[in-house]
Structure formats: C-alpha cells, structure tokens
Amino acid sequence: MCREARELSASLSSWDPQTLLDALSALLLIADEEPIGRPSISRILGIGDKRARNIVAKLREAGLVDVSRAGARLTGEAWRLLRGIRCLWRNGFTIAVVPCSDVSREHVERSVIPLRDAIVITLSEPRILDVVGWVDEKGLLLPRLEGELAEHYRRLIGGLRCGEAPRCLIGVFHGSAAPCYRCCASLLHAASTL
C-alpha cells in the first residue's frame, strides 16, 4: 500500500512475522528514546531480555542500529527509512503516522477494512484499534465515521501533519499510558503488505 512502509519492511524481509513486528517496534522506540539500553527496550516493549538482545543484534547486523555503552542508537540508514514514520501519544491514545506518497484517498477508502483486519490480526487484540484515517492536502479523512464520533477523533488528531510526505495513514489506538510501539509497528506492517 505505502512505498515508504514497503521499503522499511523490505530491509527486514527475511525475518519471520513476529520478529519483524518486534524489530519495527524496537526501531520506533529507539527513534524516540535513543540512546536506550536493552533492559529498557525489554521493559517498554514487554518482551524478555533475551528477546530484546536478539532483536537489537539483528538490527545491528542489518545496519540499522549502533550499540555502545550508552545504549542503542539508530544509524543514518535507519533514520532515512523511518523518515516521517512516527509513534505519538496524546491523551491516552497512541497515534501512528505512516507516510504514503503513492496512495490515493480513494484507495484508502476502499482498503480501510482490509487494513483494519491486518492490524487486528497482527496485534491479536481487536479492541485496541479505534480508527484508521488518512491525511492529505484536503485534510483528515476518517472512512465510515460520521458525526460526533468523527469530531472526537478530529479533535484528538488535531493539526497532525505528514512531515515531508504529501499524504499519510493515521492509526489511533486506545488504552495506553505511554506510546504503544507495537500498535504503530502493526500499522506500518499492514501498510507495507496491502
């Protein structure tokens, strides 16, 4: 669906789906918190220390992470691949932003159900995803949402911009006391496969 998401996922394409999701989650976390140690990665992502160590080692082998005594940092290549991809937290909601320069508003309207299904299957938690939307030069599109509910999400998302990209997918996830990096990674993964 999104060229930017496909490019990032392609750099990790030989990995199994669970490792890919953990790696994408770790990249988004490291982007927000660098330098960050493996114990913190393990705790924040809710994965074991051995799993965090293996993920960081794989990311290092892929040339996406440098590791020092201070912790893990993204390489220039990782920053290039993550350009515009963000995982934000606002008022108890995680908002995932994935640039999509090669997709139209109409395509998103047609694809919102398969996109939602891919996210829910990846997360194995159907209740956490609130809404999938789209931002372009015409503003925010929330397919199949109207009235007061749509207005609630418009206020929450506010003046969110796509960075350098003209268009982006937005995913809103609820129920977290901090950004849900796994949620953001699930939107990123779904955007790379549809």
Image (cartoon, rainbow, N blue to C red):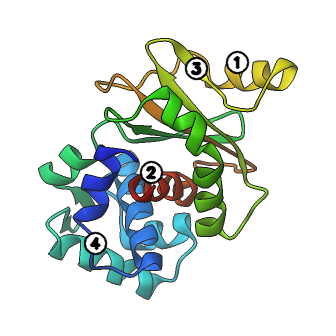
Give the image quarter of residue 19. bottom left
Residues packed near mark 1 inside 10 Å, few (<14), some (14 to 19) or many (20 plus): few
Dot 2 amino acid type: Ala
In the rendered view, does 54 fall on the left or right side of 86? left
For the point 34% across and 77% down, which residue is it? 55
For the point 39% across and 46% down, which residue is it? 32
Residues packed near mark 2 inside 10 Å, few (<14), some (14 to 19) or many (20 plus): many
Residues packed near mark 3 inside 10 Å, few (<14), some (14 to 19) or many (20 plus): many
Dot 3 amino acid type: Leu
Q: Report which residue position mark 3 lands on.
A: 140
Position of residue 40 measured from the top left corner of the image (x, y, whole percent): 46, 66
Q: Report which residue position mark 4 lands on.
A: 13
Dot 1 amino acid type: Arg
Residues packed near mark 4 inside 10 Å, few (<14), some (14 to 19) or many (20 plus): few
- In three-dimensional space, the C-alpha distance between marks 2 and 4, rounded to whole angstroms, equals 14 Å
Give the image quarter of residue 101. top left
Position of residue 63 measured from the top left corner of the image (x, y, whole percent): 14, 66
In the rendered view, does 117 fall on the left or right side of 12? right
> Which mark is nearer the camera, 1 or 2?
2
Between disc 3 and disc 2, whose residue precedes?
A: 3
Q: Report which residue position mark 2 lands on.
A: 191
Contact between marks 1 and 3 (CB within 8 A): the answer is no
For numbered disc 2, what is the local secondary structure? helix
Position of residue 155 measured from the top left corner of the image (x, y, whole percent): 70, 18
- In three-dimensional space, the C-alpha distance between marks 1 and 2, rounded to whole angstroms, equals 24 Å
Contact between marks 3 and 2 (CB within 8 A): the answer is no
> Which mark is nearer the camera, 4 or 1?
4
Q: Report which residue position mark 1 lands on.
A: 155
For numbered disc 1, what is the local secondary structure? helix
- Residue 93 in view, yes or no: yes
For numbered disc 4, what is the local secondary structure? loop
For the point 66% across and 61% down, which residue is it? 120
